[in-house]
Amino acid sequence: MQNPTELLKDYIRFPSVSTDPAYGEGMAGARNYACGLLEQLGFTVETVETELHPILLADRIGSPDWPHIVIYGHYDVQPADPFALWTDAPFEPTIRDGRLYGRGAADNKGPTIVHMAALARVLAEHPDLPLNITYVIEGEEEIGSPSMPAFFERYAERLSEADFMLVSDTGSPNTEQIVITTALRGLVDLEVKLRGPKSDLHSGIHGGAVYNPIQALAEICASLHDADGRVNVPGFYDDVVPVFDWERDELKRYPETVESYRRMLDVPAFYPANGLSPLEAVRFGPTLELNGIGGGYQGAGSKTVIPSEAFVKITCRLVADQDPVKIQQQVVQTIRDRCPPGVTLSLREGGIAEAYLVVPPGRPNTPADQPEALARAFRAADRAIGEYFGQAPIYLREGGSIPVIADFKKRAGLDALMIGLFTPIDNLHAPDEGFSLSLMDKAIAAFEDIIKRIAKVS
Amino acid sequence: MQNPTELLKDYIRFPSVSTDPAYGEGMAGARNYACGLLEQLGFTVETVETELHPILLADRIGSPDWPHIVIYGHYDVQPADPFALWTDAPFEPTIRDGRLYGRGAADNKGPTIVHMAALARVLAEHPDLPLNITYVIEGEEEIGSPSMPAFFERYAERLSEADFMLVSDTGSPNTEQIVITTALRGLVDLEVKLRGPKSDLHSGIHGGAVYNPIQALAEICASLHDADGRVNVPGFYDDVVPVFDWERDELKRYPETVESYRRMLDVPAFYPANGLSPLEAVRFGPTLELNGIGGGYQGAGSKTVIPSEAFVKITCRLVADQDPVKIQQQVVQTIRDRCPPGVTLSLREGGIAEAYLVVPPGRPNTPADQPEALARAFRAADRAIGEYFGQAPIYLREGGSIPVIADFKKRAGLDALMIGLFTPIDNLHAPDEGFSLSLMDKAIAAFEDIIKRIAKVS
């Protein structure tokens, strides 16, 4: 197999923007490229058709007695707009100061090349590697994986024969300190619209008699948190998984302080966050966030109207054991209960996703029945990362959501070993996305070691 | 002088849209037309230059010992867009079913023609009418009268020699029932912007730690009213003029019920309005209204961001004796006091306008020093309207604002007799603006009678 940097450059050159139909050729190019690499590695590749972008499903069967790993990734990327803000063209990869720039360099083409390059090295040394490996590389991750449910309908049983997943679609604080992600938050999406009078009204002629929909909305929104930053929805915290001391201890190793975090966000102060510190709140607590609001006149200057309508977009981030269906119902019911009689409420109940949590081996809350294959993989990763990055990984819950990971668990029973290869300067979803070449080198070496340790060939 | 309907048609044909520089010719045409009519009536007309549209200032000096009336109006109109929604072209006046349609037909060209036609009849009969009359016809009413302050600087002293004003720029419920407006609400304009993080943030990565500016804004907005619909700003009601029983009695004669009003607005219920009925609230109470709100993602579907900013546009309608400077400061201070430390507040303090109130003669709260000329004018209007419309006028405060009326009072000491000639079907500021020709006939007769009674020539 070629030099990994050259592989990644070639992979980036296919503009695989899944959301934009104009990039169909780029999608096909990236898919074929990934398919070709898998075939070079000896995989049997099946291109699973979907309603939009096909999913690559590839198997390499070693010995049936050895562990079976599913490696998940995605070949699609975010749009590159605004193009003008890129230093170089987003789909013409360039190297500057030890970093490879291009759309998808970090999310998720770089990590995919890391896994494949590591596997290539192991296979070069051990062509008869006993491990069984199944690749699932989808093309719709950046648009919410809409084809995965149908994929699971068809393939979950087959996937459930595997032992665990390997994923690198999460972040680490810098190129020296790797984080192994132990949880992802779930999601509940909701939009609330309040309608008052049938059209905008003159605020002089009618002001005082009419329940202004913006005011009603503000009252509802303000009621959804108490002064301590606790979500004020009855039952919201009922099923929240506790935070363990070892998790707070791991967080102390994270190379960020409350003050450095505050300066980075450029906020005058943090939210009270229901008794959690800011660094804890973004990882350990569920949230209810107002993502957008609109109503009435938003142009320059003033316009003296009582608006006919106002809306707010709400998403909740959930932690493990919270049921998104139940939470969505609770939030909806709370908003209905608090809606004043002067306005009419309508709701859009959007998508939901479950949270995910995996506990590394040897912790007070590690499940007694944790499969040995998973425990072994965690131990292998811990040692390999400690050796090749010079510091043991930090085991941390992550605030973001990758709904498909919880789905793999729910549908196929697979837990995930998530080794974070992005860093904050990688500009995911933004102009000048890039990937550190030194991190790539260390990560390939570490993954080579991890695979060998899992396969017991070193 | 020509037939009033023909005069009004000619006047409407000049498209005097003050806000749009493309209509300079229409503005000049309407101004010259009004000037010509005043000259026909024997007025000496001065065209007062301003930074934008000149003001017509015209005098007809009768006998120095007789009352001096200022008649106020405006020759500019609202834009006619959207043109496609008009049945006929807005600047080509047409008559259908006893109504004359065209932009400005009611606001304010029709009432101006009513006044002039009445005056023409009186002068035809009494060429030596003793009354002194000064016309002020401005060209910027529809854009907030920005040139009037400078006009007052120059002419307030001269205007202060007059006794009172006559204005017809307010409404009545229908063509049978005339309202004499006894008050106009003042206005305070304000915009609040809250800034949180320096850019929109990923609600997964940072959600929980950051004070969401939409939430902070909702909390502030919700705090500005209590559950009874009372504005929750310390001091807000300190100077509010009381409502007198005679005013509530007058309102009972108004041909509208709470239920008909509710159906007209198409709202499920009214706002509690601080103990006032809905029909009272829009006339007797001050308000704090949220005219527009915006922040975060407002497109289709969801976007999981914590927005960087959110804003709200607020206007207060004030009643007499509330000082707009003081109210603006109180609202600003209240918002500052309630702004949480996690966000940064910035404010745009917009324009303010004072409320206006005049008490008709013979009421419990009529000022003891009410000038006899004003009292006589009120009595004249009461009798003339009773005679020509068949029903006595209703004396009512109005919820809207005409800031220039309070300015005439403040700068030149002039109270206003405001006889409403619009009706709700006249579509002011909207497509198919029109004016009732039967109301025009009755109004001309009534004004002829009013002028004669004031001048004691009948």
Image (cartoon, coloured by chain):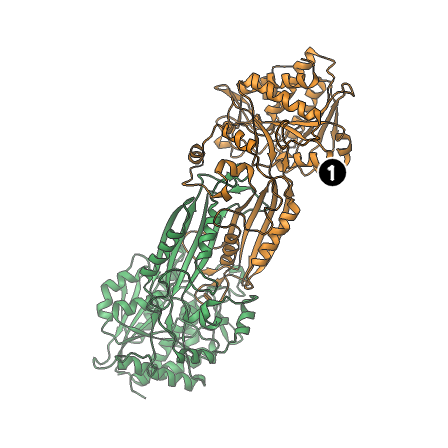
Chain colours: A orange, B green
Horizontal relation, residue B150 to residue A168: left or right:
left
Viewport quadrant of the N terminus of chain B: bottom left
A454 in relation to A262, above or below: above
Q: Residues within 10 Å of mark 1 (few under 14, many from 20)?
A: few
On screen, B5 above or below A352? Answer: below
Query: Nearest the camera: B63 or A410?
Result: A410
Q: Chain of mark 1?
A: A
Residue A104 falls in which quadrant of the image? top right
- B35 or B104, which is in the foreground? B104
Identity of the residue drawn at 50% across and 59% down: A307
Q: Would residue B105 be found to the left or right of residue A421 on screen? A: left
Give percent across and percent down for residue A196. Answer: 54, 61
Kind of residue sitting beneath label 1: Ala
The answer to whether residue A117 is seen in the rendering is no
Q: Quadrant of residue B380?
A: bottom left
> Which residue in the protein does label 1 denote?
A150
Q: Provide residue B163's location: percent of width, then percent of height.
A: 26, 76
Residue B274 at least partly seen: yes
**B263 relative to A194, above or below:** below
| Kind of element beneath mark 1 | helix
* Farthest residue, direction top: A125
In this rendering, the count of numbered labels is 1
Q: Position of residue A147 (x, y in %)?
A: 70, 37
Taking depth in this image into account, of A205 and B158 the one nearest to the observer is: A205
Decide if residue B319 is on the left or right side of residue A312: left
Question: Measured along the vertical axis of the image, is residue B196 above or below residue B141?
Answer: above
Measured as percent of width and height from the top left, residue B59 is found at 26, 73
Q: The C terminus of chain B appears in which quarter of the rendering?
A: bottom left
Of A283 and A218, nearer the camera is A283
Point out the residue furthest to the bottom here. Answer: B458
**Which corner quadrant of the image does residue A264 belong to?**
top left
